[in-house]
Image (cartoon, rainbow, N blue to C red):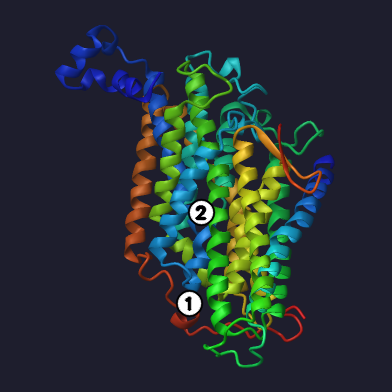
Amino acid sequence: MNNLWLALQGAWQVLLVGLILGAGLPTIFALGIRALSYGVGADADATDHVPHPFAKVVAYSCFGIVVLAILLGIGTIVASGFGLDVVFDGITPRVVAK
Amino acid sequence: MSAASLVREIFGAKGDPDDEKSIGTEQTRYVPPELVVLCLVVITALAFDFTNGFHDTGNAMATSIATGALKPKTAVGLSAILNLVGAFLSVEVALTVTNAVVNIQDSSGAPRPELIADGGQALLLIILSGLVGAILWNLLTWLLGLPSSSSHALFGGLIGATMAGLGPAGVKWVGDGTKLDGVVGKVILPALMSPMIAIAVASVGTWLIYKITANVAAKYRDSGFRWGQIGSASLVSLAHGTNDAQKTMGVITLALIATGSWTHLHQVPLWVKICCASAIALGTYIGGWRIIRTLGKGLVEIESPQGMAAEASSAAVILTSSHLGFALSTTHVATGSILGTGVGKRGAKVNWGVAGRMLLAWGITLPAAAAAGALTWWLAHTIGGLIGPIVIFVILVVLSGAMYLHSRKQPVDHNNVNDEWVEEVTDRKLPEPALSGGGAK
């Protein structure tokens, strides 16, 4: 029975972090794409549309956040391969020995 | 002992005269039987690693191939390279891999002394039989185009062979209760929960993406999500390399330790690492096209935004859980994510018939591989001596060859991987999703 309880605890954590990263990051990415398309209106086939300069800033900030998160993810894999761990106890991640 | 000297030692006696001269005739006359078996174990383990590669290509790349974000060959090539890189990145000790499910090693990674009393033969036979069972099940599910879990096949094979060899007490069913352990804690419970987690994450992601980008111009949507998809799929490939190649490295190293050919308990020999990384990468590059087809076309008609949602969900769930020590199967997560994108998109059709068949395959993977492993062990043990292991190896080669030949009758490769699914071929129409149940609102 203990296994079941432990598994539920693990599953709950994975679900929570999974939702933040696995659904949250694509959402931020989608917001970026939404921003690029600002002003298109209902004309989904528009090919001559140019993104609004401000919208461009918003969009690339969104993409930037996603790319940073992915780099952090890869960083975590690489670090754990070398016996290190990436911890997020402050604003910036730190690399510590396991 | 290096791979080259091992091979020389075993085959040297039959080699050309030059070779024999260079090693000296004294040691090549007599080849201890356990070295021959060790050689079979290493070859079989690498073969398993290879099947693990092609069985799982689809987990990362099926969606990108189905949506046309990447050409099929490019996708498998990219995935292969990332698997190779991933396999080298994970230098963490993988030596206790079998400890999750069976009691053939102690907690330090050393094989149990009674199993290596006869030069390691008892342990080698268990490992060899387990691997044979795992490969056979992997090939059968590939032939049927079913994405079943390679780790379940490996664990199943080992469990079966251990039960046959040591009795049920040799299997670690539940662990000691202090952490998730044993067959129940490391295999069965995660297998029940991880697909549900993946379905939840992917359906929420898909729903949000479609909500946000509903009125976005097609030109931004297509190219944007195409890149998002490639990025997230790459991450899944990398994570796969770091997770799965390790398991085979651990098994081979255990076999080497059992025969006394390697003594470090905290290090995997470099040649093992290189061989395993190459085997899984080569397998990935060959591509399990039948499984890619099932995942990419058989479950849900996937568009780029869904593809990105699926892979992002898979990557996040796999990386999070391996970070938290929650063991799960890449295959279960990837499939759950793809189903989730069908649940989360309004009006998307989910082929629940195929999904049901897959669920069934997941359920029986562990017992089926266990049965194959047990039967193999029993056969080899009954024949006994050096002939037993050789016979099961030959059986493995023959059955694998037969399944490969059978697959050629209806080949699925990079040319037809994206052809329309059975719906068109058989005139069977999928039911339209009910307005209340099919899509999230």
- The label nearer to you, 2 versus 1, is 2
At label 2, counting other C-alpha atoms closer than 10 Å, the crowd grade (few under 14, some 14-19, many 20 or more) is many
x and y, in percent, of residue B31 in the image: 32, 15
**For residue B422, which numbered disc appears in the image?**
1
- What residue is shown at x 55% (from left), y 90% (from top)? A45
Q: Is residue A49 left or right of residue B131?
A: right
| Chain of the residue displaying label 2 | B
Contact between labelled residues 1 and 2, with CB atoms less than 8 Å apart: no
Q: Quadrant of the N terminus of chain B?
A: top left
On the rendered structure, is B136 left or right of A41? Answer: left
Position above or below: B141 against B66: above
Q: Quadrant of the C terminus of chain B?
A: bottom right
The crowd level at tag 1 (other Cα within 10 Å; few <14, some 14-19, many 20+) is few
**Of callouts 2 and 1, which one flags the residue occurring earlier in the amino acid sequence?**
2
Foreground pick, B278 / B361: B278
Residue under numbered circle 2: B56
A70 displayed left or right of B42 = right
Q: Secondary structure at mark 1?
A: helix
Mark yes or no: residue B231 visible: yes
Toward the left, the furthest residue is B17
Q: Looking at the picture, how far across and down is residue B365, in whole percent?
A: 58, 50
Residue B425 in the image, given as x and y percentages of width and height: 44, 80
Residue under the image location 58 percent in, 48 percent down:
B239
Q: Quadrant of residue B413?
A: bottom left
Residue at (48% x, 77% y) in the render: B422
Same-chain status of marks 2 and 1: yes
Q: Chain of mark 1?
A: B
